[in-house]
Image (tube, rainbow, N blue to C red):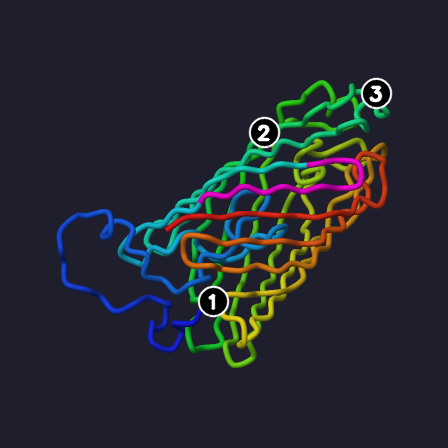
Amino acid sequence: MFQRACSAGASGEAPDEPDAGLTFDKIFDGQRTLGTSGLSSLEGSSGGGIASWATIGGYGSKKSMGMAFHYSYVSLTNYTDQNVGAVMGFYDRVEISYAHNFFRTGSTGRKLGIGHGYQFDLDTGGIKVRLFGHVLDKTLLPQVAVGAMYKHDGDAKVIHAVGSKHTDGADVYIAATKLFPKLGLLVDTTMRLTKGNQWGILGFGGDRNDNYYPQFEGSLGYLPSFIPGLVVGVEYRTKPRNQNFTPESNWFDVYASYFVNKHLNITAAYVSLGTIATYRNQTGAYVSLQTGF
């Protein structure tokens, strides 16, 4: 991961090649350094599993585009979540993303009174713009980006029954991400304004609060020099408390991600998501596969 940092230049791009006309390799040149596209978050944007980073998805340089697709699976104590999505980056400046979550309650659905195996569906569309900096240049200036997400929950009857105010909501955030190659350390801090309950699976706003408040997301990653392509780390994300019936907890994970090459990334994590829909201690495993160019 990031193994071409010294020769790639400030933006992690390979040297320009002679113009060969409009070809696939020209549109998607894949010139950015391995790992600079980030991972895939559960909301579709590039970043960590539970945190959005300032990275731009795909490996396109400032003269081309890039794409990535992902599938993620989370198995918790009482629930499971499957997530599919795609991201497209334009000129290492703008990112557009989409993700769909299939949140399944299994036998817990019957205990909650919504039916055995009830499934919540959440669609998330996002846009992110890099303002300045590069995650891999030689300065101390981080890569900084602003982003927005629009989310739609397709389960109006149930989410209103548990105290949520809205089926649709929007998040906005600002993120700063930086790699320190000599230390092998990746650092991200993100501030998000949201009213999403369980990131939107249980709607937006509630009987306790229906206002936007800032929430923190942070990631630390370590890149061991003896295993190129590997990053291990931790993430933490604070959550709003909008509902009395279904209180939330802050999220935490410990992850390991291996970049086989620019076309395949494999991530595994232990996740601790606290209380979800009255059931406490929701811990388990997270697995994600990402492919792209």
Which dot, 1 or 2, sits closer to the camera? 1
Q: Is 222 within the magenta?
A: no
Pointer 1 and pointer 2: residues touching (CB < 8 Å)? no
First along the sequence among labels 1 and 3: 1
The magenta region covers 69-80
Badge number at residue 152: 2
- Of circles 1 and 3, which is in front? 1
Q: How many marks?
A: 3
- Image coords of residue 191 (percent x, y): 62, 55
Residue where numbered disc 3 is placed: 113
Residue 52 lies, in percent from the top left, at 56, 52
CB atoms at circles 1 and 3 under 8 Å apart? Answer: no
Rounded to the nearest whole Å, what is the CA distance between mark 1 and mark 3? Answer: 47 Å
Secondary structure character of the magenta stretch overall: strand
What amino acid is at disc 2?
His
Q: Secondary structure at mark 2?
A: strand
Q: CA distance from mark 3 to mark 2?
A: 23 Å
- Local SS, label 3: loop
Residue 242 in the image: state x and y as whole percent.
77, 38
Q: Which amino acid is tagged 3? A: Gly
| Residue tagged 1 | 1
Secondary structure under tag 1 reads loop
Depth check, front residue: 131 or 68: 68
- Which amino acid does the dot numbered 1 rest on? Met
Quarter location, residue 133? bottom left
Name the residue rendered at 36%, 50% in the picture.
Answer: 66
Q: Position of 214 compared to 7: left or right?
A: right
Note whether 101 is above or below 67 in the view shown.
above
Residue at the image point whose x is 45% and y is 57% from the top: 37
Q: What numbered label is drawn on residue 130?
A: none
Please name which of the two marks, 3 or 2, marks the residue nearer to the observer.
3
